[in-house]
């Protein structure tokens, strides 16, 4: 509540009347700022490889992450893997209880492609995998929780790696076939679908990191081929749902993009331009074709110019045909947003022409303020105004689409149940969300906390903990314990206010 202190002496009735009106306005403003809209929904999120375990249980096939962690464990900081993880494949009923305990509306989880189709191709269906997801979905609905399903959260069937993974155009149809079967199997109950989680990470970071790709393409090209095919695969899945399933299932489908806010390091024109350039390379590269017909112009121009100087006959960034542009445009019913941190961005001289690379194409440098609040991950500073700036920018740049914040969370390294820093993090970021809604008019309709429980955090293994629930990974039974943040989140949902 805003407290107003008045020290001036009121000598006239009209002054008293004015003050009372002003106080009433402040109370009204306070209520609207600190109360979530009636249609705003809360959720928690996970992903298959990070929590399920059962890596080869009941006929499941091998994914790229299975292969990576088994063959090159040194690629993971603690040399761990997701073979057991949180053992959610066997403890899914407890998972549903935990979601229920938080009081949220949504549970966002992903499908393991190879748990349903062990070889990746849809001709061989693994019924125990289908049963697992059916049981989970049905139990969620029984408890009044809406399932939100991500089709692809980074665990590609290993069978497709020798094909070139996402650098190969064959992935468009392979993904479309997979999506169609998922809609057939689960779409009668699932009303919110996400095609891909964070394509930037898939194409800029993990595509090469996974190390299982036999591809003739060099760095500086592979990222854009991956992006190009992944976006076309997203459009394929969207149209399959739109034409074949939406009329009877009445759901919605889109994509989730990650966005680390790029704030100009100064008010110099070159730094302001550099920050916008970085936003377009990191976010617009994926959002713009879906919303605005094509890749951002600054991205196309820079890559084309550098490609020409490097001796390429054409830009390293593939071009969409007119038919592909038309198929991509408008393939979103909402915009999924994952956000974790913020960076200052400054202009730097263009790197000399040499070996092509995505960073050289982007042509900026970034850094973080040492005074910003730290977390358990050095890259994840607590900067809530960065989230608000993102929501402002999306509203302005893309005509205020519906935004679902599909991931936002705080990592520590202890996993302690006394997680006051996590509670303070959620207070600040939920406050930034409310400011964006009420003061900026952003069309934000959901906030999903990452994550329901501590889990396998990719390259970091089990070293950092994002969970609302602690998991004892030293106990074969993988017991879960609620942290203080569970009670805090439940109170937010019940009161629809931060504090």
Image (cartoon, grey):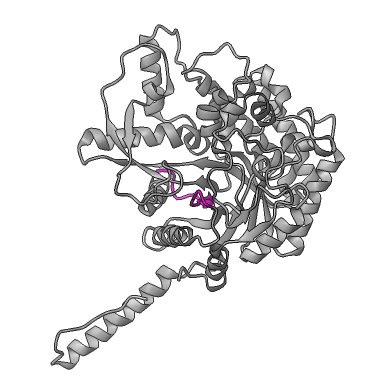
* Rendering coords of residue 194 (x, y %): 63, 44
Residue 323 visible in the displayed image = no
Query: Is residue 404 located in the magenta-colored stretch of the structure?
Result: yes
Residue 193 is situated, as x and y percent measured from the top left of the image, at: 65, 46
Residue drawn at x 38%, y 51% as measured from the top left: 392
Q: Nearer the viewer, residue 352 or 23?
A: 352
The picture places residue 355, in percent across and down from the top left corner, at 41, 12
Q: Please count the marks in the image.
A: 0
Relative horizontal placement of residue 400, taking residue 86 as reference (left or right) = left
* Residue 178 painted magenta: no
Left or right of 372: which side holds 270?
left
- Of helix, strand and loop, which mostly describes the magenta segment? loop
Residue drawn at (43%, 45%) of the image: 380
Q: Is residue 344 visible?
A: yes
Left or right: 173, with 448 as reference point: right
Where is residue 466 shown, x and y percent of the image? Answer: 54, 50
Q: Viewer-proximal residue, 360 or 306?
A: 360
Quadrant of residue 308 within the rendered picture: top left
Q: Is residue 61 above or below residue 138?
A: above
Magenta-drawn segment: 397-414
Q: Nearer the viewer, residue 321 or 50?
A: 50
* Quadrant showing the C terminus: bottom left
In the rendered view, would you say 287 is above or below 322? below
Task: Judge by depth and name the residue closer to the eye, 242 or 260.
Answer: 260
Q: Quadrant of the N terminus?
A: bottom left
């Amino acid at each position: 509540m805003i407290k107003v202190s008045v020290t001036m002496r009121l000598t006239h009735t009209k002054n008293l009347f004015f003050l009372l009106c002003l106080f009433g306005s402040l109370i009204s403003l306070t209520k609207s700022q600190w109360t979530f809209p009636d249609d705003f929904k809360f959720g928690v999120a996970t992903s298959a490889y990070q929590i399920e375990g059962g890596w080869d249980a009941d006929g499941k096939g091998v994914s790229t992450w299975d292969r990576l962690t088994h063959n090159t464990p040194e690629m993971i900081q603690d040399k761990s893997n997701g073979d057991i993880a949180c053992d959610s494949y066997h403890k899914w009923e407890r998972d549903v209880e935990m979601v229920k305990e938080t009081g949220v509306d949504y549970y966002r989880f992903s499908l393991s492609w190879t748990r349903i189709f062990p070889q990746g191709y849809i001709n061989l269906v693994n019924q125990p995998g289908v049963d697992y997801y059916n049981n989970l979905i049905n139990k969620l609905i029984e408890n009044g929780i809406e399932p939100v399903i991500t089709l692809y959260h980074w665990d590609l069937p290993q069978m497709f790696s020798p094909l070139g993974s996402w650098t190969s155009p064959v992935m468009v149809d392979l993904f479309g076939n997979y999506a169609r079967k998922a809609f057939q199997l689960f779409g009668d109950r699932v009303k919110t679908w996400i095609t891909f989680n964070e394509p930037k990470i898939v194409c800029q970071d993990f595509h090469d990191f996974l190390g299982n790709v036999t591809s003739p393409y060099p760095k500086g090209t592979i990222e854009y081929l991956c992006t190009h095919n992944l976006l076309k695969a997203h459009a394929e899945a969207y149209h399959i749902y739109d034409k074949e399933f939406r009329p009877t299932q009445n759901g919605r489908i889109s994509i989730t993009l990650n966005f680390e806010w790029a704030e100009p390091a100064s008010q110099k024109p070159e730094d302001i331009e550099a920050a916008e350039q970085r936003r377009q390379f990191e976010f617009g590269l994926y959002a713009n074709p879906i919303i605005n017909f094509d890749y951002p112009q600054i991205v196309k121009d820079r890559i084309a110019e550098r490609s020409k100087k490097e001796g390429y006959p054409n830009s390293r960034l593939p071009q969409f045909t007119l038919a592909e542009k038309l198929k991509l445009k408008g393939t979103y019913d909402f915009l999924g947003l994952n956000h974790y941190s913020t960076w200052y961005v400054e202009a730097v001289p263009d790197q000399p022409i040499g070996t092509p690379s995505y960073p050289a194409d982007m042509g900026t440098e970034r850094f973080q303020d040492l005074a910003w609040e730290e977390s358990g991950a050095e890259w994840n500073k607590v900067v809530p105004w960065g989230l608000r700036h993102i929501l402002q920018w999306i509203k302005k740049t893309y005509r205020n689409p519906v935004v679902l914040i599909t991931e936002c969370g705080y990592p520590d390294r202890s996993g302690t149940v006394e997680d006051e820093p996590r509670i303070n993090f959620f207070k600040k970021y939920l406050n930034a969300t409310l400011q964006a809604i009420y003061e900026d008019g952003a069309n934000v309709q959901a906030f999903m906390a990452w994550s329901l429980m501590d889990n396998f955090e990719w390259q970091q293994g089990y070293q950092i903990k994002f969970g609302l629930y602690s998991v004892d990974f030293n106990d074969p039974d993988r017991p879960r314990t609620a942290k203080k943040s569970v009670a805090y989140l439940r109170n937010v949902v019940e009161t629809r206010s931060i504090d």
